[in-house]
Image (cartoon, grey):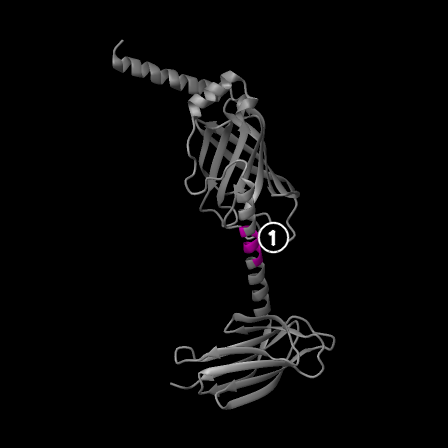
Amino acid sequence: MNKTCKCIVCLLSFCLCLSTLHSQNNKWILGEWKGTVITPGSAYSTVFTGILTIYAEHKNHFVGKLVKEVTGNKDIRIEKNISGILIRDEMNIETGRTIFVKQPVHGFWADCSNCQMVNSRITVTKDSIVLTYVTTHCDRYCDGIAKYAKPLTDLDTSTQRKLVSLFGTADIIADFHPTLPLHKNEVAKLQNQTETKMIDANDREAEQAQLNRKTKTIATYDVYSTDIKIELFDNGEIDGDTITVYHNKTKIVDRQGLGIKPIVCTVKASSKERVHEFILVANNLGTIPPNTALMRITAGSKTYELFASTTLDDNASIIIIYGGE
C-alpha cells in the first residue's frame, strides 16, 4: 500500500471513529457540568456559578438545563431549558424557556436567549473534560465567557481514551483563562472588582436620580476673580440637615451635615471655564423641614450671602459667571 493510500485509510478511520463517537456513543455528555461564568460588563456581578445538566442525548442531539446563580447564594439564580447539537469538538447550545428565576435585590437577570455563543470548544485538561464558550456582540450584560467541566474519571477507561485522542489538551481562550475551580484568591479578587463595580453603578444611578430632580436657579452672579469660594452653614437651628453639592454636574460634597462650622468648596475660574453652576441636593429634611442652608460666596473682594431651601423633590442652584480675561 503506497503512502497516499495509507493516509487516506488513516483519515477515513479517524472520521469513522469521530462519527461513531458523536452519533452513537455520546453518553459521556450526560450529567452535571460545573463551571464559572464571567460577565465583565454586568453591573450586578462579574463572576457567577454555572451548572449545565444534560438529561438526555440521541445521536448528536441533547437536552438539559442551564443554571446561572450568584456565587455563594444559590437562591438568587435563573434556570433555563436548553437543547443543542454536538459537532466534532463543539457543543452548540440554544436556550429555551425560563423555568425558574429569582431576581437579585439590586439588579436583574438579563435575557440572553437571543445571544449567539461562539468559539464553543471541548478539550480535555488534566483530569477533566471541559466545555468553553464565549458570547460576544450581544449585550453588555450577556457578553462573556463560560467554562464548564466534569471529571474524566467518571467515565470508563475506553471512553476516556477516546476523548483524549479526539479532544486532547489545549489552551482555550487567550483573554480569560479562568480555571475550574477558580482559586480562592482569584475569586476574592473578582468579587472585590464586582463589589466596586456594583458600588460605582449604584452611585451613578443615585447621582443621576438626584440631578433629575427639579432644580430652581435662585441666583446668578457675575464675578471677575478667578478664585471662588462657597461656604455652607445650617440656616437657624441645627436639626441634622445633610446635603450633597454638585459643581457643573460633578459631585464635590457628599452627604455632609450642615452646622456651625462651614462646608467649604473652592473652584478656579478661567477664560476657558467661565460658567460655574453649584447644585444643592437635600439628602434628608432634618427634624425641621425643609432642608435649609446659608450660602456665603466669596470671589475676590466680593461677598454674597443667600438662603437656599431644598426638599427631596427640589434642588437649588446658583450660577457664577466669570467675566475676567
Q: Quadrant of the C terminus?
A: bottom left
Could you classify mark 1 by the number of other residues whose Cα lies within 10 Å: few (under 14), some (14-19), or many (20 or more)? few
Looking at the rendered structure, the secondary structure element under dot 1 is loop
Numbered circles on residues, count: 1
Camera sees residue 53:
yes
Please tell me whether residue 76 is drawn above or below residue 278 in the rendered image. Answer: above
Residue 166 is a magenta residue: no
Spot occupied by residue 272 in the image (x, y as percentages of width and height): 39, 77
Of all residues shown, which one is farthest toward the right? 287
Of all residues shown, which one is farthest toward the bottom? 301
Spot occupied by residue 138 in the image (x, y as percentages of width and height): 47, 47
Residue beneath the point at 45% across and 86% down: 225
Residue 194 is a magenta residue: yes
Q: Quadrant of residue 68?
A: top right
Please tell me whether residue 93 is drawn above or below residue 58 in the rendered image. Answer: below
Spot occupied by residue 188 in the image (x, y as percentages of width and height): 56, 46
Q: Which residue is mark 1?
A: 107
Q: Quadrant of the N terminus?
A: top left
Spot occupied by residue 266 in the image (x, y as percentages of width and height): 51, 78
Residue beneath the point at 56% across and 78% down: 264
Dominant secondary structure, magenta: helix
Per the rendered image, the range of residues in magenta is: 193-199
Of 289 and 59, which appears nearest the observer?
Answer: 289
Camera sees residue 113:
no
Of 230 and 223, which appears nearest the observer?
Answer: 230
Please tell me whether residue 7 is drawn above or below residue 325 in the rendered image. Answer: above
Q: Amino acid at mark 1?
A: Gly
Please tell me whether residue 97 is drawn above or below residue 105 in the rendered image. Answer: above
